[in-house]
Image (cartoon, rainbow, N blue to C red):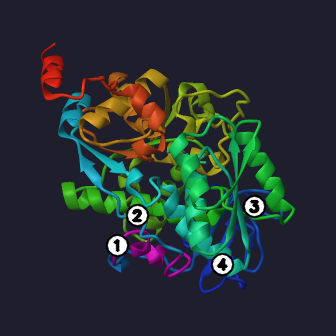
């Protein structure tokens, strides 16, 4: 089976639990959702997706935040700190400068731990409770570890995080630390951390909450649902395109799934699905390579480097879910330089929006696509900014202005200002 906007509603298998089950995206094998711990298909090792017997319409959504969309999720509520309901900012100067019909910034840095990861964890940790596990684990470039540590603690579970030594921004380590995670610093990059944690999970040492876990992506679908509702309320129409940073391509996969389900429910015309447009840092761009080459598989990059440490990833594990999403929606993927990322961070800061470097990749990518004429001036665009400025204070300080030493008297300060 291949993923498609034209898919029809499947019949629930006998072992579905309250109309929820898991299905392999490669061989269509189905599994009961909460009987056993499982991350990939037993038959072919393909990625799994959550399926529902009933798909909601916009009218079914009520309340605020991730759990507004409970009817599109496996549970009514989760382990929550009121995640979601993030702002969709207008940015009139940037919109005019980039030269598109409408530009909005969906700032996921405004979630409780400062990144979109909270949306996945509120669902993922709820599932962990259902499964009765007591230790949670993830590999992380930082934000996943911060969110896992916070939601795991709130859920009363032990958390273990594997981080690439020396490559995680200060704010993120501080969060994982204070929320009580055991932090293992691995002498290797993120992809090596993920290889190890997958092995640990396979040996039953911990429950894996990276985006390979299909339930996490259910929570992240709500980004797409919020963007559609927010854009419609604000602008009167859905956006033509959503531009987002790509690491493991979890969000790309989650948004594609949100839109497939809306199309299946008859709530969205397949032609109106926003073009999913991924942006990677030039030093870590295996998805871009696959899109440019028309490849069905992504080649793992062993050496990756970028200032945007959150997306310093060479092996995007969700590529089999994300590549069809980018292609079928008419989107694309583009790589941007670290300099362009920092410039975009400054552009957003000028509009009062503080983001970490990886987040600014979306705006840098949009600028490049406009310059290349791939995005035209009539488009309505939402850029996703995935993490808060304070996640990476060193990058912010390096991109911003330097403090100026002054004497401790008013005359001295005035003299300095006039100097
Ligand atoms: N932006 C930020 C700020 C991130 O932290 C990440 C991923 C991404 C974008 C990429 O999202 O994987 O859905 O394509 N961070 C993970 C982590 C890898 O460990 O925090 P994706």
Q: In this view, does 132 lie to the left or right of 5?
A: right
Q: Residue at x 64, y 37 (%)?
A: 313
Residue 10, horizontal then vertical, whole percent: 60, 74
In the rendered structure, are the residues bearing label 4 and label 2 in contact, judged by CB atoms less than 8 Å apart?
A: no
Q: Of the residues under marks 4 and 3, which one precedes in the sequence?
A: 3
**Front residue (pair 112, 173):** 173
Q: In this view, does 380 lie to the left or right of 44?
A: left
In the rendered structure, are the residues bearing label 2 and label 1 in contact, judged by CB atoms less than 8 Å apart?
A: yes
Tell me how far mark 1 sits from mark 3, CA to CA.
32 Å
Tell me how far mark 4 sits from mark 3, CA to CA.
19 Å
Q: Which residue is drawn at 42% across and 44% down?
A: 390
Q: Of the residues under marks 4 and 2, which one precedes in the sequence?
A: 2
Mark linked to residue 40: 3
Query: Is the residue marked by circle 1 packed among few (<14), some (14-19), or many (20+) residues within 10 Å?
Result: some
Q: Residue at x 61, y 68 (%)?
A: 152
Name the residue that disc number 4 marks.
Answer: 129
Kindly indicate the quadrant of the structure image that contains residue 135. Answer: bottom right
Name the residue that disc number 1 marks.
Answer: 64
Which residue range is magenta in the image? 63-78
Tell me how far mark 1 sits from mark 4, CA to CA.
23 Å
Tell me how far mark 2 sits from mark 1, CA to CA.
8 Å
Q: Which of the image's four quarters has the C terminus?
A: top left
Q: Of the residues under marks 1 and 4, which one precedes in the sequence?
A: 1
**Front residue (pair 278, 113):** 113
Kindly indicate the quadrant of the structure image that contains residue 270. Answer: bottom left
Name the residue that disc number 2 marks.
Answer: 84
Is 287 above or below relative to 201?
A: above
**Front residue (pair 312, 235):** 312
Residue farthest to the right, as pictured:
203
């Amino acid at each position: 089976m291949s993923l498609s906007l034209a898919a029809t509603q499947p019949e629930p298998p006998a072992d579905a639990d309250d109309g929820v089950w898991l299905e392999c995206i490669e061989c269509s094998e189905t599994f009961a959702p909460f009987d056993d711990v499982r991350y990939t298909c037993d038959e072919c090792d393909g990625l799994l997706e959550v399926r529902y017997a009933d798909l909601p319409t916009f009218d079914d959504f009520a309340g605020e935040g991730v759990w507004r969309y409970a009817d599109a999720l496996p549970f009514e509520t989760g382990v929550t700190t009121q995640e979601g309901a993030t702002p969709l900012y207008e940015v009139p100067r940037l919109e005019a400068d980039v030269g598109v019909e409408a530009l909005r910034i969906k700032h996921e840095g405004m979630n409780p731990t400062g990144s979109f990861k909270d949306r996945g964890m509120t669902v993922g940790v709820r599932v962990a409770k259902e499964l009765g596990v007591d230790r949670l684990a993830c590999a992380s470039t930082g934000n996943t570890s911060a969110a896992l540590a916070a939601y795991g603690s709130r859920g009363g579970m032990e958390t273990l995080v594997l981080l690439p030594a020396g490559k995680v921004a200060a704010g993120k380590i501080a969060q994982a630390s204070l929320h009580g995670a055991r932090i293992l610093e691995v002498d290797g990059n993120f992809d090596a951390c993920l290889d190890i944690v997958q092995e640990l999970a396979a040996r039953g040492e911990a429950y894996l909450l990276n985006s390979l876990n299909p339930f996490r992506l259910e929570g992240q679908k709500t980004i797409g649902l919020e963007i559609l509702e927010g854009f419609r309320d604000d602008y009167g129409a859905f956006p033509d395109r959503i531009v987002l940073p790509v690491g493991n391509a979890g969000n790309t996969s989650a948004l594609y799934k949100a839109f497939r389900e809306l199309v299946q429910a008859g709530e969205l015309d397949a032609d109106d699905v926003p073009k999913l447009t991924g942006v990677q840092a030039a030093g870590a761009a295996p998805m871009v390579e696959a899109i440019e080459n028309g490849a069905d598989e992504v080649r793992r990059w062993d050496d990756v480097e970028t200032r945007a440490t959150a997306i310093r990833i060479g092996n995007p594990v969700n590529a089999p879910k994300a590549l069809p999403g980018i292609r079928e929606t008419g989107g694309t993927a583009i790589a941007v330089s670290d300099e362009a990322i920092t410039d975009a961070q400054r552009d957003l800061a000028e509009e009062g929006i503080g983001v970490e470097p990886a987040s600014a990749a979306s705006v840098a990518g949009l600028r490049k696509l406009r310059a290349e004429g791939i995005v035209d001036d009539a488009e309505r665009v939402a850029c996703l900014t995935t993490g808060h400025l304070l996640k990476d204070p060193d990058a912010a300080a390096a991109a911003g202005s330097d403090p100026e030493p002054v004497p401790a008297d008013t005359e001295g300060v005035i003299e300095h200002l006039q100097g």
